[in-house]
Image (cartoon, helix red, strand yellow):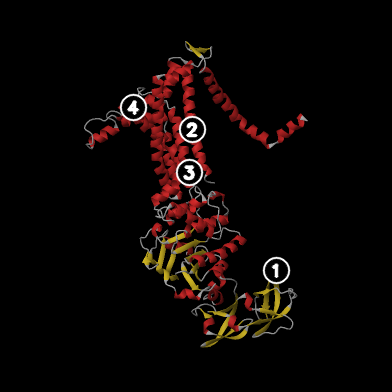
């Protein structure tokens, strides 16, 4: 009986499905789930000089949640990442709109291709280049001074948060442009004519028709930009010169410099929790918009 | 169907030598026509003839390269689509998928100064008018094709436009639904009294619904007439071929003095009235006749006008009708005729010899 059931399963479509999915599933289990479980486990242990041991404790979390510095850095991370998300999506929308509505269909893929060009260079190199652009006597400064808009170097780089936002917004622009572009492409153009036919100007039609219909794309863009930027590590290190650390830098320092793996784990779990909460909120919002079409 | 009273009505739309180019492509080639107020007017033609382009120049979605479009006496040059006194039912219906049925219908009322309660009442009335009472709260994406169509109609009519534009509104519906909507559109048009302009490639639909029809080919109006004239007196072989079925027989003109005497293959010598003669005289000469103008004579029946002999070459049985391909004696190809099936009367077999009755008055001469 059980033999024949096994036989039936072996021949079923489900079995071949499991077979196909098993290599990535094993990979994810080993390299994502297992390390995360370890981090979760560590976060409840006590740190003892470069290692962790029992007893189990909630002390790490208590420190993370009550520590002034942690709170401040966490808030800064969220603030930077929200600013980056806002700036990126606000700039990405018009670009995506332009490509979708104003570029002739035969040239659209060329435009999308051009947008991905920044990805041809390494992220670290791109970040370093922003130092040259924004730094003291850099390209921005020399340009401003040569046209007489500034009498001395502005040195945007000295404003850590601002330069981090500029750098990240540039880095994540394509990630925001693409989902918005896709959602704009899906908008039936006759709907826009209908909006105008019913007495609304182009702009009001955009607000009443195009924008609500492309909200799923906008929300996808928000998530794609927000989630990785909260935990961004390289940019604060290279641009801010480590002077304006974000939460990832603190975790790194706890884990590797201070060798307090329990504390680092508790911080990491906290960040994950916050990001997850924000993401779930957006996913629910997205479902509301997705529910309205089909 | 034919409404002679429309000729007394004022002009609602006037085209004066309208041209439209897309790059090198000459889409509209000098359209001059007037559409009367309260008329059910159709633009009929094969795809690519410019009928939709012409409709879109009225709506304001398409600019014209030269000429003038007047709506209710006003030149529409530079007038944007959103301020024109026209509303459109789109081919795809263009129902807003993120809004409910009542939000769709009330979409155009946003700028209307009437109170919220009055707007809700207007929406409910519009929905009732198109037979969608109680559907207001439904999500637009949960509607069937026929219901979307009705929402599109309600959404346009609620704004009381001077002209309602319908771009192939029935083409996406199945046959039964289409016939039902045809009747409903006619009823609606009579009820609201608004000028309806319908774009269609379906000649039957145009004949059923319109007061007048403009038949278009290659960016030009080939004939503009009421359905009966269009069917009985098409002004060219091309129009005749497009509207219903027309049989053509080669002919020779024998004499011409007021009346035209011709020798037509299978029909012999016939004398035709000047009103039956179409064309400029430059084309090949042929006579045309509709399938129902030739009648098979059964035993005991006699012709009231002319009578000929023919052989049955093909029989297509449709239940209520039978179509025969008959070869008239002396003709080199058959004509297709239609006969209503009457109880107790046999359907002829292929190869049967039969007498047929016809009348010279039903023929049209093309030359």
- Identify the mark at residue B319; answer none if there is no mark: 1
Percent position of residue B237, x then y? 54, 74
Number of marks in the image? 4
Label 4: element kind: helix
Mark 4 in CB contact with mark 1 (< 8 angstroms):
no
In the image, A37 versus B251, the foreground residue is A37
Q: Nearer the viewer, mark 1 or mark 3?
A: 1
The span from disc 1 to disc 2 (Cα, nearest Å) is 65 Å
Mark 4 in CB contact with mark 2 (< 8 angstroms):
no
**Residue annotated with mark 2:** A279
Q: Earlier in the sequence, mark 2 or mark 3?
A: 3
Label 1: element kind: loop
Using the rendered image, report if marks 3 and 4 lie on a common chain: yes
Q: For the residue carrying disc 1, how many other residues have a C-alpha within 10 Å: few (<14), some (14-19), or many (20+)? A: few
In the image, B163 versus A54, the foreground residue is B163
Q: Is residue A151 left or right of residue B195?
A: left
- Disc 2: which chain? A
- Identify the mark at residue A291; answer none if there is no mark: none
The span from disc 1 to disc 3 (Cα, nearest Å) is 52 Å
- Disc 3: which chain? A
Using the rendered image, report if marks 1 and 2 lie on a common chain: no
Percent position of residue A202, x then y? 40, 52
Percent position of residue A85, x then y? 41, 34
Query: What residue is rendered at 74% in x and 32% in y?
Result: A5
**Residue annotated with mark 3:** A182
Q: Nearer the viewer, mark 1 or mark 2?
A: 2
Q: For the residue carrying disc 2, how many other residues have a C-alpha within 10 Å: few (<14), some (14-19), or many (20+)? A: some
């Amino acid at each position: 009986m059980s033999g024949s059931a096994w036989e039936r399963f072996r021949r079923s479509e489900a079995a071949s499905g499991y077979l196909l999915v098993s290599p990535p599933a094993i990979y994810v289990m080993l390299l994502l789930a297992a390390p995360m479980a370890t981090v979760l486990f560590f976060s409840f242990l006590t740190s003892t000089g470069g290692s962790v041991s029992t007893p189990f404790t909630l002390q790490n979390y208590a420190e993370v949640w009550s520590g002034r510095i942690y709170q401040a850095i966490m808030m800064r991370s969220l603030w930077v990442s929200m600013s980056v998300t806002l700036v990126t999506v606000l700039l990405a929308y018009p670009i995506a709109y332009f490509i979708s509505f104003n570029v002739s269909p035969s040239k659209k893929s060329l435009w999308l291709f051009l947008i991905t060009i920044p990805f041809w260079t390494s992220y670290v190199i791109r970040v370093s280049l922003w130092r040259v652009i924004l730094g003291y006597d850099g390209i921005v400064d020399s340009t401003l001074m040569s046209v007489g808009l500034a009498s001395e170097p502005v040195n945007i780089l000295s404003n850590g948060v601002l330069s981090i936002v500029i750098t990240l917004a540039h880095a994540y622009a394509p990630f925001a442009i693409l989902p918005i572009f896709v959602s704009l492409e899906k908008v039936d153009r006759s709907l826009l004519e209908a909006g105008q036919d019913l007495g609304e100007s182009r702009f009001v039609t955009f607000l009443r028709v195009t924008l609500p219909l492309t909200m799923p794309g906008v929300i996808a863009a928000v998530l794609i930009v927000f989630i990785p930027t909260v935990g961004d590590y390289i940019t604060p290190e290279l641009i801010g010169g480590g002077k304006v650390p974000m939460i990832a830098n603190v975790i790194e320092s706890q884990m590797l410099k201070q060798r307090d793996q329990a504390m680092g784990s508790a911080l990491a779990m906290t960040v994950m929790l916050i990001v997850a909460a924000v993401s779930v909120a957006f996913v629910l919002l997205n479902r509301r918009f997705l529910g309205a079409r089909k | 169907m034919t409404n002679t009273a429309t000729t007394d009505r004022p002009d609602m739309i006037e085209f004066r030598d309208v041209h439209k180019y897309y790059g090198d492509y000459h889409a509209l080639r000098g359209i001059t026509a007037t559409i009367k107020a309260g008329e059910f007017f159709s633009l009929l033609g094969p795809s690519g003839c410019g009928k939709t382009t012409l409709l879109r120049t009225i709506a304001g979605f398409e600019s014209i390269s030269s000429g003038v479009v007047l709506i209710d006496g006003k030149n529409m040059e530079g007038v944007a689509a959103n301020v024109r006194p026209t509303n459109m039912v789109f081919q795809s219906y263009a129902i807003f998928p993120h809004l409910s049925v009542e939000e769709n219908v009330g979409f155009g009322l946003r700028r209307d100064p009437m109170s919220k309660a009055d707007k809700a009442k207007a929406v409910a009335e519009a929905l009732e008018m198109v037979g969608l009472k109680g559907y207001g709260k439904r999500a637009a994406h949960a509607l069937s094709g026929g219901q979307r169509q009705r929402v599109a109609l309600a959404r346009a009519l609620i704004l009381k436009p001077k002209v309602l534009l319908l771009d192939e509104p029935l083409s996406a519906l199945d046959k039964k639904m289409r016939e039902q909507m045809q009747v409903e559109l006619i009823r609606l048009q009579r009820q609201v009294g608004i000028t309806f302009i319908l774009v269609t490639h379906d000649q039957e639909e145009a004949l059923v619904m319109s007061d007048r029809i403009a038949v278009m080919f290659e960016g030009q109006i080939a004939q503009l007439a009421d359905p009966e004239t269009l069917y009985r007196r098409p002004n060219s072989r091309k129009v005749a071929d497009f509207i219903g079925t027309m049989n053509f027989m080669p002919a020779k003109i024998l004499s011409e003095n007021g009346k035209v005497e011709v020798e037509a293959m299978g029909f012999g010598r016939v004398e035709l009235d000047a009103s039956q003669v179409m064309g400029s005289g430059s084309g090949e000469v042929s006579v045309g006749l509709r399938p129902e103008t030739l009648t098979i004579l059964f035993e005991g029946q006699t012709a009231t006008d002319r009578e000929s002999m023919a052989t049955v070459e093909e029989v297509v049985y449709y239940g209520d009708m039978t179509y025969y391909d008959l070869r008239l004696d002396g003709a080199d190809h058959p004509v297709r005729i239609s006969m209503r099936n009457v109880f107790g009367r046999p359907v002829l077999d292929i190869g049967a010899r039969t007498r047929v009755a016809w009348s010279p008055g039903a023929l049209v001469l093309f030359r």
